[in-house]
Amino acid sequence: MIGGLQALNCLDIRTLATEYLEDELPPEDRATFGQHIEPCEKCNEWFEMLRQAIEELGELSTDELSTLTEKVLIHQFRRRKQGRSESEPEEEPETGTRSRPGT
């Protein structure tokens, strides 16, 4: 757990957003998060889109998601929580299907 954050930049906001939304940040770090996001239009807009997406996805039951979609979503949320950007190369999540060369 992080404690006593001094100042945050936009990348920090993206890295800590999940912890903020899950109320895992200590109160002083939540305040530091808010001090950055409130005046930063870019982060504020991104954070509100994230919050809205989570709210809308939270209304879906797992029965409504295909197995592949569920795995891709979990994979992306884990990447973001670990602070990796979408442009960083990494193996794709296991889909349970494999393509054969020439097929």
Image (cartoon, grey):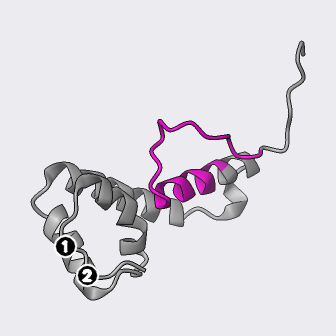
* Amino acid of disc 1: Gln
- Which of 29 and 39 lies nearest the eye of the viewer? 29
- Which of 5 and 59 lies nearest the eye of the viewer? 5
Are the residues flagged by discs 1 and 2 in contact, CB closer than 8 Å? yes
Q: Is residue 81 left or right of residue 103?
A: left
Please tell me whether residue 12 is drawn above or below residue 21 in the rendered image.
Answer: above
Residue under pointer 1: 6
Q: Position of residue 78 (x, y in %)?
A: 56, 58
Label 2 environment density (alpha carbons within 10 Å; few <14, some 14–19, many ≥20): few
Residue 83 lies in magenta, yes or no? Answer: yes
* Amino acid of disc 2: Gly
Q: CA distance from mark 1 to mark 2?
A: 6 Å
- Magenta residues, start to end: 72-94
- Which of 96 and 82 lies nearest the eye of the viewer? 82
Q: Secondary structure at mark 1?
A: loop
Q: Position of residue 82 (x, y in %)?
A: 50, 59
Find the residue positioned furthest to the top.
102
Number of numbered discs overlaid on the protein picture:
2
Q: Secondary structure at mark 2?
A: loop
Disc on res. 4: 2
Q: Quick one: quadrant of the C terminus? A: top right
Q: Is residue 88 left or right of residue 65?
A: left
Q: Residue at x 45, y 62 (%)?
A: 54
Please tell me whether residue 26 is drawn above or below residue 14 in the rendered image.
Answer: below
Q: Quick one: quadrant of the N terminus? A: bottom left
Residue 81 lies in magenta, yes or no? Answer: yes
Q: Position of residue 44 (x, y in %)?
A: 21, 57
Q: Quadrant of residue 97?
A: top right
Q: Residue at x 53, y 57 (%)?
A: 77
Disc on res. 17: none
Q: Quadrant of residue 89?
A: top right
